[in-house]
Amino acid sequence: MRGPRFSVITIVRDGEEHLAEAVESLKEQSVEDWELHIVDDGSSDGTPALATRLAEGDPGRIRLHRHPGGVNRGMSAGRNLGLHHATGEFVTWLDHDDRFLPRKLETLHAAMERCPEAVAVIGPCRRWWSWSSSDREDEDQAILTSGTDQLLPPPGLLPVFLENPRAVPLAPLVRRRPLEAMGGHVEYFPGMYEDQAFLARLMFRHPVLVIPDVLHLYRQHDSSCVARTHRSGLDVQNRRRFLHWLAMEFATCGPRDESLRLSIARATHATRSWRIRRWQRLLINLRSRTLTR
């Protein structure tokens, strides 16, 4: 019996507010041959009960996984647990607070069929403010200036999002066997920069097809991992940690690209004052809380 074509992995910790909506966006896809692996990463709210109901409501396609003992192991380990159970030819990721637009899986797969040499296909996301009462307008990500498909050999988009972190794409569709062979996600990064470390590992090794279609809604809210890290003042420290790892990864498996090596060095140098910047951020947050009391 033929298995599902697409394996979708959703990691969640204390995400009961948006999880059902994310799953609904998967059920609204124009294709039906998918499986969903929900990985509960040590939730303490109503997420486990909700995830159980979602799995029981569609037992042929939705499965729930937990780490032994129900512990929290971080985002990368959660994604790898989902990957361990994936059976589809292609894998992608749907964060518990995001949404797929209805033709995402179909469109990415069609692009992969057009370009069989690509190991992954990816497009821009939409920073999604309009889900709430925010007066900010939604913003489509700018990855490449071209409005047509582009097959990028290693290092792919890495120079683009190294220069501009806002250009980091989300949730590519990846062929499962090469994904497993390269070791999946980098568990050294449990939170911030786990996505960039994974994309760097992927793009150092394989050609990636970039398409212009916006197919992913990236929800913007104050409780996201990115927002919490910025409020804590740890964002620059985390970026420095990522860049040190990236330099080592580049040295062992990166393309022989001197301009990329220099870009990594320049980006690392720019984070040298991370301690000062962290204390500045903490003071700003403290003053803001004091003024609102």
Image: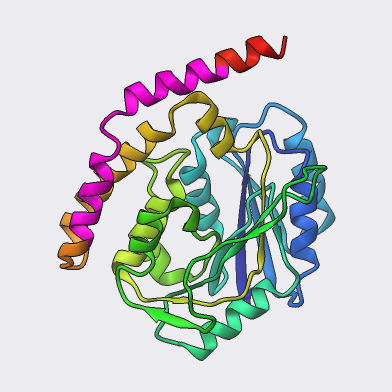
Residue shown at 53% from the left, 88% from the top:
113
Residue shown at 31% from the left, 38% from the top:
240
From the viewer's perspective, tell me whether residue 29 is left or right of residue 242. Answer: right
Above or below, 122 relative to 86: below
Camera-side residue of 193 and 48: 193
Above or below, 176 relative to 94: below
Above or below, 28 relative to 5: above
Camera-side residue of 87 and 234: 234
From the viewer's perspective, tell me whether residue 23 is left or right of residue 179. Answer: right
Camera-side residue of 77 and 55: 77
Main SS, magenta region, reads helix
Which quadrant of the figure contains the C terminus?
Answer: top right
Q: Residue 106 appears at what percent x and percent y?
A: 67, 79
Q: Residue 160 appears at what percent x and percent y?
A: 38, 62
Residue shown at 77% from the left, 32% from the top:
46
Residue 1 appears in the picture as rendered = no
Q: Is residue 281 a member of the stretch shown in magenta?
A: yes
Quadrant position of residue 18: top right
Quadrant position of residue 193: top left
Q: Residue 93 appears at what percent x and percent y?
A: 58, 58
Bounds of the magenta segment: 260-285
Residue 35 appears in the picture as rendered = yes
Q: Is residue 187 a member of the stretch shown in magenta?
A: no
Give the image's coloring scheme. Answer: rainbow
Residue shown at 38% from the left, 51% from the top:
197
